[in-house]
Image (tube, grey):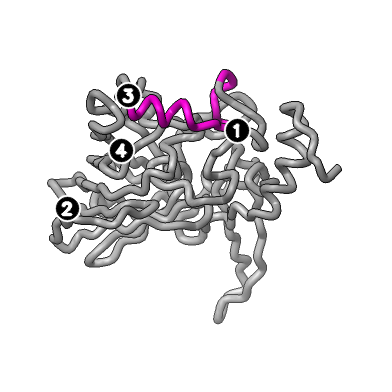
């Protein structure tokens, strides 16, 4: 999809406040590239929010960049995957990645691949852990992801995870505060989703344990462990992942970044497939 490769777009929206002629500026966090000079200047000039370790609201972007400005999107903070079970290895070998984040040794043209993203299926979690927004209510938190503007519910009203769950793309999650840390446990993930663009699999028995910490006004840290004995022989312990708050906090919005099937198919036929030596039958 072409729009998924568009760099940060900044819209200057002229608005009249009730009694003020001020110009309102709406900023969108980066989807696949670095910020423009204007956005960086605005962020530098914006006041930092009042620090509250229990206030995770705002839009968060992973720190660090690849060459060329593309954001680093790594599974489990780039911690090596544990050995797979026979079932897990069978699933891994059956997955044929074709997106830009896939390892070159595994990447195939979309016409030969089966990445769920090629059909614009939901990315699921934690694959969609890139740019996201936290919205807090008294009973739950919403983790809204920029890709697809899909959301994950984290219930904080004291409920427990049921023993019998129907799998969902973004699973079932409950959380509670342990001091200044938000502790989240989740399971019930639809095994059709991949953990990353390289095709790492999981089963519907996967369980995630996450600890969200907010050490200062501008930082969010996530420590994650993945337990899926059907797929991996050991618990997968992630490296800590750090995210930075997008400023100005009050008027920064998520970019509308949808995977549109017609656009995805057109881009595959016109760019990705020819690059892999596959010529569309329609041409």
Does the magenta run of residues contain 252? no
- As drawn, the label of residue 86 is 3
Task: Tell me whether circle 1 and circle 2 mark residues in contact (CB < 8 Å).
Answer: no
Q: Look at 36% across and 20% down and name the residue there.
A: 80
Instruction: Please name the residue that numbered disc 1 is placed on.
Output: 98
Reading the image, the residue beneath label 2 is 176
**Callout 4–callout 2 Cβ contact below 8 Å:** no
**Closer mark to the observer between disc 4 and disc 1:** 1
Q: Is residue 180 left or right of residue 122?
A: left
Q: Earlier in the sequence, mark 1 or mark 3?
A: 3
Q: Secondary structure at mark 4?
A: strand
Question: Gap between marks 2 and 3, in whole Å?
Answer: 35 Å
Badge 4 or badge 3: first in the primary sequence: 3
- The quarter of the rendered structure image containing the C terminus is top right
Residue at the image point whose x is 67% and y is 47% from the top: 1
Q: Start and end of the magenta stretch? A: 86-105
Q: CA distance from mark 1 to mark 3?
A: 24 Å
Q: Position of residue 21 (x, y in %)?
A: 62, 73
In the picture, measured across the screen, residue 171 lies left or right of residue 124, that is left
The numbered mark, 2 or 3, whose residue comes first in the sequence reads 3
**Front tag of 1 and 2:** 1
N-term-proximal mark, 4 vs 2 = 2
Mark 4 or mark 3, whichever is nearer to me = 3
Tell me what residue is drawn at x 54 percent, y 39 percent.
115
Q: Earlier in the sequence, mark 4 or mark 1?
A: 1
Q: Is residue 212 left or right of residue 176?
A: right
Residue 225 visible (yes or no): no
Instruction: Check the image and name the residue furthest to the bottom.
Output: 18
């Amino acid at each position: 999809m072409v729009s998924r490769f568009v760099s940060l777009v900044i819209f200057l929206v002229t608005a009249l406040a009730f009694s003020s002629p001020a110009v309102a500026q709406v900023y969108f966090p980066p989807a696949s590239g670095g910020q423009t000079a204007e956005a960086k200047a605005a962020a530098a000039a914006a006041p930092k929010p009042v620090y509250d370790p229990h206030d995770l609201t705002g839009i968060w972007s992973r720190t660090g960049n690849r060459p060329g400005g593309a954001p680093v999107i790594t599974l489990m903070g780039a911690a090596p995957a544990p050995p797979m079970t026979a079932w897990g290895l069978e699933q891994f070998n059956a997955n044929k990645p074709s997106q830009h984040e896939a390892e070159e040794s595994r990447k195939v043209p979309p016409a030969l691949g089966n990445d769920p993203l090629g059909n614009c299926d939901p990315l699921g979690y934690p694959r969609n852990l890139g740019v996201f927004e936290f919205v807090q209510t008294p009973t739950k938190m919403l983790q809204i992801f920029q890709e697809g503007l899909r959301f994950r519910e984290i219930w904080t009203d004291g409920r427990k995870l049921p023993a019998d769950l129907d799998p969902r793309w973004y699973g079932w999650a409950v959380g509670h505060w342990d001091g200044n840390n938000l502790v989240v446990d989740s399971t019930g993930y639809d095994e059709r989703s991949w953990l990353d663009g390289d095709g790492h699999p999981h089963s519907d028995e996967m369980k995630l344990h996450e600890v969200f910490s907010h050490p200062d006004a501008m930082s969010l840290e996530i420590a994650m462990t993945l337990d899926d004995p059907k797929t991996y022989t050991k618990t997968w312990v992630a490296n800590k992942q750090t995210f930075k708050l997008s400023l100005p906090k009050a008027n920064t919005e998520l970019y509308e970044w949808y995977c549109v099937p017609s656009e995805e198919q057109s881009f595959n036929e016109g760019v990705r497939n020819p690059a892999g030596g596959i010529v569309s039958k329609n041409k």
